[in-house]
Image (tube, helix red, strand yellow):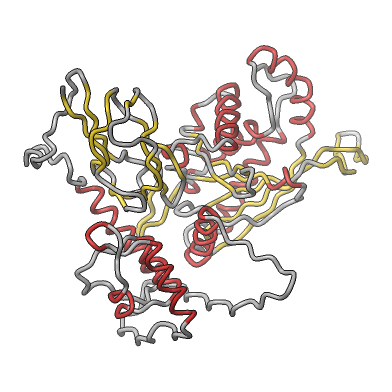
C-alpha cells in the first residue's frame, strides 16, 4: 500500500488560490482514475478536480469554504500499487522536496496580484499590521463594504485556525446593518508622491444609495458568477482608458462562400461551419500583422505576448458569460478552428470547461450580433488591452463601385467595434488593427477550398 497526495493543480498564470466548494467523495470511498474528488471555485470558473490515481480516500486536508493555495495537498488517497510520490501522514515531507510549499513564482504572483488590486481599489481596511490571515475574497468584501481594520479584527472566524470566511463577514455586515451601525471609520490617506501618468489610480466610484423596494417588486440575489462578472467589469473600467473604433464591413463574399460550403463541410467533418471560426481566423491574421495589440501593461512595462490566444465570449443558459480561450489560434487552419470553436462553445454551455481553458487569453472577441445588436462597445477583458465586438450581419442597400461605374446593390454588411486601452494603444494602431480584420474579410476568396 502507498499513499498519494492530491494537490490543487495550477489553474492558469493569474490564479494562485481557490475556494473549496464541495466534497464529492467521503473518507473511505473508493475512487477511480479521473473521477472527480472535490469542487473548487476561483474568480474565473467553478470546476471539479479529478483523481490522478485509483484507490481509497484516506484523508481530507481542507473543509468546505476553505481557501487553498495552488500546490497545497487537498486529499490523501491510499493506493494498492506503488506511485511516484509517497508520504506519511503524520510526518512532514522531506525538506528538500518542498512538496507542500507553494513554489516561489506562486508566492511572488500573489504579491503582484495584491498590489494590482490595491492600486485599482484602495482598501478601507489596512491589514498590514494584522496577525490574522484574510483571504482575497474576504479582503475584497471588506473593501467594497467599507469595513475598517478595527471592525475586521473583531469578526469571529469559523474557518480553519480561526480564519474569517465569506459567511462570517457577510453575517457581520448583515448584523451591522440591522443594528443601524455606521460604515467604516474614515481614514485620511497618507501623502504619497505623484504617480506616473500611466499608473494614476482611478478614483473609487461612489457607492449607489439603497434602492427602495416597493410592494410587488421582486428581489433577485446576484449569483456568485454574477458578482464576479460585476466586479471584473467595474475593475476594468477603473483600470483602462477605454476608447472605440468602428468599421463597417462588406461580408457578402464570406456569406456566399459559407452558404455554398457548409453542407459539404458538415458531411465531411461532422461539424457545423459557423461564421465564428472565419472571424477568429481574420483576428489572428490581424494580430500577427499588428502584434502590439497582443500585449498587457505591467506598471511602466509593456508585456508583448508570444502566443496568440483568442478568447471568445460565450453566453451561458443562466444569462452569464464565460470566455473560453483558443490557444495558439494563429496556428490553426479553418477546419481546426471550427472544431475548436464548436467544442469550447458546447462545453461552455454544459459547464464542462476546465480551468486552464479559460486562462491565458491575450485578446477577446464577443459576438453581440447573435442577440440582434448592430454594434456594441464591449469592456476590455483584463489584463488584455483590446476586445472586438461582432455586430449582426444584415442585408442592406449599398453603393457598389466598378470600372464601368457605380450602382446600388444588396450587400451583406456588419459592423466591427474595437474597444482598446488608450493608455498603450493609440487611435492609429487601434483603427488600423480593426481595419485589417475588415480587409481580410472583404477580400475573402469565394473559391477557397477547405
Q: Position of residue 419 (x, y in %)?
A: 59, 55
Q: Which of 14 and 147 is in front in this view?
A: 147
Q: Quadrant of the C terminus?
A: top right
User: Quadrant of the rendered structure where residue 108 is?
Assistant: bottom left
User: Quadrant of the rendered structure where residue 448 is?
Assistant: top right
Judge whether 387 appears above or below 118 on screen: above
Q: How many labels does the image show?
A: 0
Q: Position of residue 185 (x, y in %)?
A: 37, 86
Q: Position of residue 190 (x, y in %)?
A: 30, 84
Q: Position of residue 131 (x, y in %)?
A: 19, 69
- Residue pushed farthest top? 268
Q: Nearer the viewer, residue 167 or 449?
A: 167
- 60 relative position to 405: left or right: left
Judge whether 430 appears above or below 299 on screen: above
The residue sitting at 64% across, 76% down in the picture is 211
Q: Which of 76 and 428 is in front in this view?
A: 76
The residue sitting at 63% across, 58% down in the picture is 244
Q: Quadrant of the N terminus?
A: top left
Q: Nearer the viewer, residue 122 or 79?
A: 79
The residue sitting at 47% across, 41% down in the picture is 358
Judge whether 221 appears above or below 103 on screen: below
Amino acid at each position: 500500500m502507498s499513499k498519494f497526495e492530491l494537490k490543487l493543480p495550477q489553474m492558469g498564470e493569474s490564479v494562485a488560490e481557490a475556494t473549496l466548494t464541495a466534497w464529492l467523495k467521503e473518507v473511505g470511498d473508493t475512487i477511480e482514475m479521473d473521477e472527480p474528488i472535490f469542487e473548487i471555485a476561483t474568480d474565473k470558473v467553478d470546476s471539479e478536480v479529478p483523481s490522478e490515481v485509483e484507490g481509497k480516500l484516506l484523508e481530507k486536508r481542507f473543509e468546505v469554504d476553505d481557501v487553498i493555495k495552488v500546490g497545497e495537498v487537498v486529499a490523501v488517497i491510499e493506493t494498492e500499487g506503488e506511485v511516484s510520490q509517497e508520504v506519511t501522514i503524520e510526518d512532514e515531507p522531506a525538506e528538500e522536496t518542498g512538496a507542500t510549499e507553494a513554489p516561489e513564482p506562486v508566492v511572488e504572483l500573489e504579491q503582484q496580484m495584491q498590489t494590482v488590486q490595491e492600486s485599482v481599489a484602495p482598501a478601507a481596511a489596512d491589514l498590514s499590521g494584522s496577525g490574522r490571515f484574510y483571504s482575497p475574497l474576504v479582503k475584497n468584501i471588506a473593501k467594497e463594504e467599507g469595513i475598517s481594520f478595527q471592525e475586521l479584527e473583531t469578526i469571529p472566524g469559523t474557518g480553519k485556525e480561526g480564519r474569517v470566511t465569506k459567511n462570517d463577514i457577510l453575517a457581520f455586515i448583515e448584523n451591522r446593518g440591522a443594528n443601524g451601525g455606521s460604515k467604516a471609520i474614515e481614514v485620511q490617506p497618507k501623502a504619497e508622491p505623484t504617480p506616473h501618468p500611466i499608473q494614476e489610480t482611478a478614483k473609487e466610484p461612489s457607492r449607489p444609495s439603497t434602492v427602495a423596494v416597493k410592494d410587488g417588486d421582486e428581489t433577485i440575489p446576484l449569483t456568485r458568477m454574477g458578482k464576479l462578472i460585476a466586479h471584473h467589469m467595474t475593475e476594468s473600467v477603473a483600470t483602462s482608458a477605454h476608447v472605440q473604433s468602428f468599421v463597417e464591413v462588406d461580408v457578402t463574399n464570406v456569406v456566399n462562400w459559407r452558404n455554398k460550403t457548409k453542407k459539404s463541410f458538415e458531411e465531411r467533418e461532422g461539424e457545423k461551419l459557423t461564421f465564428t471560426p472565419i472571424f477568429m481566423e481574420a483576428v489572428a491574421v490581424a494580430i500577427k500583422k499588428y502584434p502590439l495589440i497582443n500585449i498587457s501593461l505591467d506598471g511602466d512595462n509593456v508585456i508583448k505576448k508570444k502566443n496568440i490566444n483568442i478568447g471568445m465570449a460565450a453566453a451561458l443558459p443562466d444569462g452569464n458569460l464565460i470566455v473560453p480561450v483558443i490557444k495558439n489560434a494563429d496556428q490553426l487552419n479553418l477546419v481546426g478552428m471550427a472544431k475548436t470553436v464548436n467544442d469550447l462553445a458546447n462545453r461552455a454551455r454544459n459547464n464542462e470547461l476546465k480551468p486552464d481553458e479559460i486562462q491565458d487569453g491575450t485578446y477577446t472577441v464577443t459576438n453581440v450580433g447573435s442577440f440582434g445588436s448592430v454594434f456594441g462597445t464591449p469592456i476590455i477583458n483584463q489584463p488584455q488591452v483590446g476586445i472586438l465586438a461582432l455586430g449582426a450581419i444584415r442585408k442592406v442597400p449599398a453603393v457598389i463601385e466598378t470600372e464601368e461605374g457605380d450602382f446600388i446593390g444588396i450587400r451583406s454588411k456588419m459592423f466591427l467595434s474595437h474597444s482598446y486601452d488608450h493608455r498603450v494603444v493609440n487611435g492609429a494602431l487601434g483603427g488600423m488593427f480593426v481595419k485589417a480584420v475588415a480587409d481580410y474579410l472583404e477580400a475573402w476568396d469565394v473559391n477557397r477550398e477547405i
